[in-house]
Image: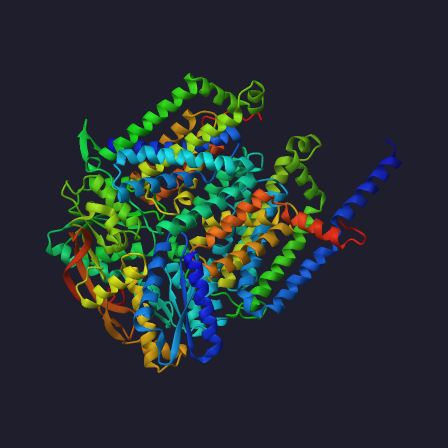
Amino acid sequence: MRNRFGLLGAAMLGLGVASASAQEVARVGVILPMTGPFASTGKQVVAGMRLYLAQHGDVVAGRRIELLLKDDGGVPDVTKRLAQELVINDHVVALGGFGLTPLALAASSVATQAKVPEIVMAAATSSITEASPYISRTSQALPQTVAPFTDWCIANGIRSVVTIVTDYGPGYDAEKWFKEPFEKQGGKVVAALRVPVANPDFAPFLQRAADAKPDAIFIFVPAGVGAVVMKQFAERGLDKAGVRLIGTGDVVDDDLLNNMGDVTLGMITSQHYSAAHDSDLNRRFVADFGKANEGMRPNFMGVSGYDGMALIARAIARTGGDTDGTKLIEAMKGQSWESPRGPVLIDPATREIVQNDYIRRTERRDGQLWNIEFATIPMVRDPAKAGK
Amino acid sequence: MLTNLFDGFAYGMLLFVLACGLAVTLGLMNLVNLAHGAFAMAGGYVCMILVNRHGVPFFAGLPIAFIVCAALGVVAERLLYTHIYRRSHLDQVLFCIGLIFMVDAVVDYFQGPQQQFINIPDFLKDRFEFLGVSVGAYRLLIIGVCGLIAVSLQLVLTRTRFGSRLRAAVDDRRVARGMGINVDLVFMLTFAVGSGLAGLGGALGAEILGLDPTFPLKYMIYFLIVVTVGGTASITGPFLASLLLGVADVAGKYYIPDFGAFVIYTVMILVLIWRPQGLFGRVATR
Amino acid sequence: MTTQRIATLRLQAVGLHDRLSAWHWSEYLFWVLVAASYFLFPSRHLLMNEIAILALFSLSLDLILGYAGVISLGHAAFFGLGAYTAGIITKFGVTDPLIGLGCATLAATALGLATSFLALRGSDLTRLMVTLGVALVLYEIANRLGWLTGGADGLQGMDVGPILGFDFDIFGAVANAYSLIVLFVLFLIARRVVHSPFGWSLRAIRDNPLRAAAIGVPVRGRLVAVYTLGAAYAGVAGALLAQTTQFASLDVLAFHRSADVLLMVTIGGVGYLYGGLIGALVFKIMQDTLSNLTPQYWEFWIGLVLVVLVLGGRDWLERLAALVARRTRPGAGR
């Protein structure tokens, strides 16, 4: 109920403002999965976006920024239609959100045709930013967090690895960008397993990995599922057999970490954001985020939404309130600022985010579980695009 | 190899406890209760809230989940399902999908869309060697509990008066009613037990299957597979079907991981082509 | 029986058939409204396009559900195959939408024919599960053939050419017109089919297969034929979706497509062709409105509507029509 009334209120407020000063409103269309299996992604991203506006005020260069939230339920053709309708009927100045790779790609042709910037705040397949010259990204390209991780593995005596990835685009990216740099440095991927997207029980995959007796199992699965794998890994007793579980931060999602319990302790992961990141900006971000969302802890999706909103606001500020799409995307290139995750930069050539990658260990501090960053690989560009 | 068999068994047993209520309601009242998974989810959430937030021990949480879901089952049966028994299958499907949508949104509203976990006691996280087979304590618990349930269900069905009434009602509702059996009461109790078992399964299975608002829709297909492959004429049918599917699924994913997802569906299609009434079903006479 | 009597009977039958298959004024009204909506709501072309496609998809399910009584929970198999076929051939340089439509229809027809032998056995539940299984297997195949279908990322770089010289525009005006015209043409064909002796024999089978067989209707052959026809229609709907959105992803084969289309047909009412059309319209507009009001919890309200609909009786449209008819009849009153 509260959400509905809140929205109703916001809508009435929006109407009032729109009729009073129609020219000054800059609408941003936000398309996210708010229902279905990826609803938690949508919730985090939109909470991050709203928090940015709450902290910094919603007026930039004389323009009042207004968010129009739409639910695509994770269905690509709906994403595309919503993007078109937002552009045509609501005259949005930018599109944001995009929970999964096919959703971001489905909307890319709209961005190109209508010359409206599309800011990807969740989907992580490397190739997304190449789909349209109007796409920029504030989440991550998966190789950014996977490739640098292999250096750490080699340096810490991990020589043989079994990779387990979810059977979809980002999964292949993760598999490829782990294997190549890892084997170049003398490591060996002894088996590469792919798990179906809809998969209830990980037992057979973990058992197979265990039977290969590697030094470590590298895992990439979507947030949410990661926690299930984590528990089943511990249950299989692989940790006691001397096999380490390593992976991207998805398996120790900050949003879920406390509920996952002690099985996560000591887990080493690589990710661009941890809610435990040591900076004043981040501490304020985490505190305000929790306050606005019933104690929810921001995860890497939340910070992507926050930074996505920051990027749009900064671009509008740079153009002096001009919301022409081509000028906006130009104004986004080369932007750099201090984010709760650390310094970030939008690569002018690829419109891809450039950011630190952190190696973290899961620890208990003050009665809560946190991913504590202990090594930083500064300003990583997407290695998948660096070679081109 | 044996470890796989063991894992498959545990998974299959879990499927059985989750789906047996569905099999009985289908056989007894010809009710396609697609919303059966909603009771399983309710059980999972009840157990999670009690154990994680109120410090109730896990082993007390399980029976409470059963009782709460059985009570929910009675309420839902009296208030809602009783209106749709005599409707067409199409109506029932529509109704249940509507229910699933509502339950989904309600859980999302109160508990959020994210995955939930139940804090299980540490000794259940252990693993040990048994006759050369590596065995997980939690999966052993699942096999134990579910095996116990399966055996007691079988005993109740074959050895008690209630069981014979139930079987009579499944075989021919009209004649059973004519013989003075209160079919409605039998059915209400069965529905309650079925819902309760689903709730227990949801609580037990959260560790393996996960728990989030999309649970009923995500696992609906699996429950249906168990019921169609096993047939609805007995409790042994769904039981053996669950084990078959559990083992086939785990083995398929272990030995041919690239085609893991195909196995369970292919098995189902082949079985249904071979025996459209299910492996252990009889040709319908009604 | 004398020849004269046979002739009278035949005349009576023809008369009955003509009366039942004649166009009712409300049908003209329906299509006039559809045509008018195209010009009245230029800002909603995209939504209308989606509704037209879903309406065609629902129509295809109504053919097999409403006229042959086969419940399918895997109708997305044909929809998805049509979508992928239409998408993939553009990558081989065949960009003409009509050729694409033809190829998609052929592919879906072939699959429909092949799977009809699996899907027409056993009870309702068995059929439900076999059709569902076929769709799920197809989903996995599409996922597996990443080099052809783009896997989970969706089919990239689809390039659909202009339709009869009109380019697909971002407002969806051309797309909407295209979909509506295809829908109308296929509706006319479907209407013709169900009012033919073939259509009547289907209804006989639906109502009582044993009796139908006894009076000499080839039950199996007829069911295979209509199942295949339904599959072909679904393939066209899928192709339209892929062409007008210039995108195809695994989602076109997903379970929720099959479930949604079943919802739409049942909301609108089965077995009179317009049910699927009206159901698609009602369902989609309801979904669009509710999800705009409450993006996170709209499913609750849709669910509530479904539950109330079933409890109140699915024949709401008929009763509404009867009510209107009573009110408008001169001299009628309470």
* Residue A130 drawn at (x, y percent): 34, 68
Q: Residue furthest bottom?
A: A320
Q: Is residue A312 left or right of residue B165?
A: left
> Which quadrant does the C terminus of chain B fall into?
top right
Choose top left, top right, bottom left or bottom right for residue C294.
Answer: bottom left
The number of discs equals 0
Q: Is residue B146 left or right of residue A69?
A: left
* Residue A327 drawn at (x, y percent): 37, 80
Coloring applied to the structure? rainbow
Choose top left, top right, bottom left or bottom right for residue B157.
Answer: top left
Which residue is rendered at x = 65% and y = 54% of the image?
C187
* Residue C270 drawn at (x, y percent): 62, 45
Q: Is residue A129 left or right of residue C161?
A: left
Residue C309 in view, yes or no? yes
Which residue is rendered at x = 47% and y = 68% of the image?
A12
- Please say if A141 is above or below B247: below
> Which quadrant does the N terminus of chain B fall into?
top left
- Please say if C105 is above or below A64: above
Q: Is residue A308 left or right of residue C182?
A: left
Residue C94 in view, yes or no? no
Judge by depth and name the residue closer to the eye, A51 or C228: A51
- Please say if A257 is above or below A290: above
* Residue C150 drawn at (x, y percent): 39, 57
